Image (spheres, rainbow, N blue to C red):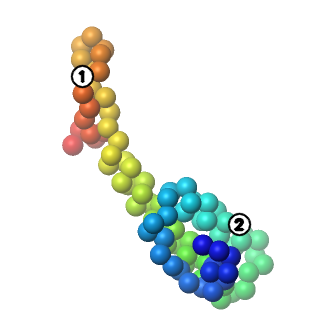
Amino acid sequence: MTENAENSGAIGDVSGYSFEKAVAELESIVARLERGDVALDESIAIYERGEALKKHCEKLLAAAENRIEKIRLDRAGKPQGVEPLDGE
């Protein structure tokens, strides 16, 4: 999202963002808010965008956690297969 789109107050759709892109934009928003040189209305708008990015990152992390598998070893310590991380 461009600076102009952020300035317009549009939250926009972040569902197609990669985790890395969402985190980078979220970090940019935090930096802008921490500087304190943003008008109140714009601060509220970019804060809302930040919330959307945060939720998207949480969703991506949860999905990644669900896909993580641990390797099952046999008694000799050789890989035998995989199972869900939580044994589900």
Question: Along the line of sight, which residue is nearer the eye, 86 or 72?
Answer: 72
Question: Along the line of sight, which residue is nearer the eye, 50 or 13?
Answer: 13
Quadrant of the rendering where the C terminus is positioned: top left
**Image quadrant in which you'd find residue 5:** bottom right
Circle 2: element type: helix
Can you give x and y, in whole percent of width and height, for residue 21 in the image?
56, 60
Circle 1: element type: strand
Tell me the residue that label 2 is attached to: 31
Vertical position of residue 50 compared to residue 61: above or below: below
Q: Amino acid at mark 2?
A: Ala
Vertical position of residue 52 compared to residue 88: above or below: below
Spatial distance from mark 2 to mark 1, Cα to Cα? 47 Å
Q: Amino acid at mark 1?
A: Gln
**Image quadrant in which you'd find residue 39:** bottom right
Q: Residue at x 54, y 63 (%)?
A: 22
Q: Residue most toward the bottom?
A: 41
Quadrant of the rendering where the N terminus is positioned: bottom right
Residue 43 can be seen in this image? no
Q: Is residue 39 left or right of residue 17?
A: right
Tell me the residue that label 1 is attached to: 80
Can you give x and y, in whole percent of width and height, for residue 11 in the image?
53, 80
Q: Residue at x 24, y 22 (%)?
A: 80
Vertical position of residue 71 compared to residue 43: above or below: above
Please tell me whether mark 2 or mark 1 is closer to you in this view.
1
**Image quadrant in which you'd find residue 30:** bottom right
